[in-house]
Image (cartoon, grey):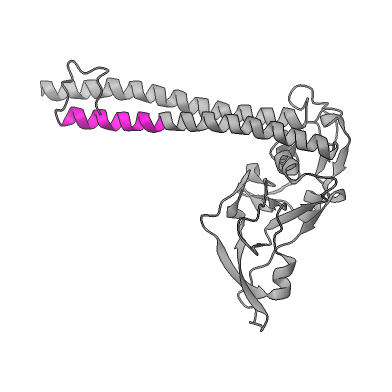
Amino acid sequence: MDEQQRIANFLEAETARIGLMTAAREAQLAALEERVFAAVTETLTPGSLSKPHGGFPHPWLPKTPGGSRLTRLGYVCRLQNGVTVDENRAPTASDVTRPYLRVANVQAGHVALGSVTEITVPRNMAKRSTLCIGDVLMTEGGDLDKLGRGTVWRGELPECLHQNHVFALRPEADKLDPEYLAFMTQTLHGRCYFESTGTKTTNLASTNSSKILSFPIPLPSLKRQHELVGEVRAMQDASQRTRRALNRQLSLLGERRQALITAAVTGQIDVTTARGVDAT
């Protein structure tokens, strides 16, 4: 019993120490996400976090966000609607089968292609809902904090369609950079706009094409948009390196905890002298 108690005491102390280190790394990850969000916001809409004007209709914005006037999204890009799933649709001679994106595939900053469904529709319908490289994908509904999330389609799948709950925004090439728009949806301005204009239910929220096209964005010159996109990418690349390092440390801490438990209960280490020992 004395030996069992020593093992229990040892593991309680050591796992608690590992738990504290794990909690610290998790807190660092959360702080990193907040820092990236703040940095992207201040890069694209300077003053949003430090000098919001507090006035109607966008109290979270400074008076001249990004040094340029706000422009409704509908003035600088068009919106393409997706295909509606209809199991009762009668087959036609022109039917084609294509991959198509659902809401679950569209994440903030990337497209998740681990599970992509195919749909069979008439060729003319497929043509109207085929994605083009440079389209900005935005979701119609989901969790409130993910509403309107945007990401750029890069042609990952040929002849890919999109569901009607996913909107495809096609910017005018000489006025709006797709990457700039996608990043703008991830700023405080983007989140506040879609959360304040979204239709909310108990667990979900939704937006519509009219609200998306009414999204007001600062519209500097295309050259300046490219520069801002480069700055945001550099910040995100740096944060991704830090994120990978923190996640690696979390993985190692988990392995260390399991190795200690296994070594202690199988007698591979002497718990009376093993504090800080390499149990691997």
- Report which quarter residue 185 is drawn in: top right
Q: Describe residue 267's horizontal placement relative to residue 192 as left or right.
A: left
**Which contiguous range is marked in magenta?**
250-266
Q: Position of residue 257 (x, y in %)?
A: 30, 29
Q: Is residue 108 visible?
A: no
Q: Relative to 201, is 38 above or below?
A: above
Residue shown at 70% from the left, 47% from the top: 148
Residue shown at 77% from the left, 31% from the top: 45
The residue nearer to you, when weighing 178 against 42, is 178
Q: Position of residue 235 (x, y in %)?
A: 64, 30
- Report which quarter residue 47 is drawn in: top right
The residue nearer to you, when weighing 248 against 10, is 248
Q: Relative to 199, is 258 above or below?
A: above
Q: Position of residue 209 (x, y in %)?
A: 77, 55
Is 149 inside the magenta-drawn segment?
Answer: no
View extreme (left): residue: 1
Residue shown at 65% from the left, 31% from the top: 234
- Report which quarter residue 164 is drawn in: bottom right
Q: Describe residue 262's horizontal placement relative to residue 112 as left or right.
A: left
Q: Describe residue 225's horizontal placement relative to residue 102 as left or right.
A: right
Q: Relative to 260, is 212 above or below?
A: below
Is 263 inside the magenta-drawn segment?
Answer: yes
Q: Position of residue 153 (x, y in %)?
A: 67, 52
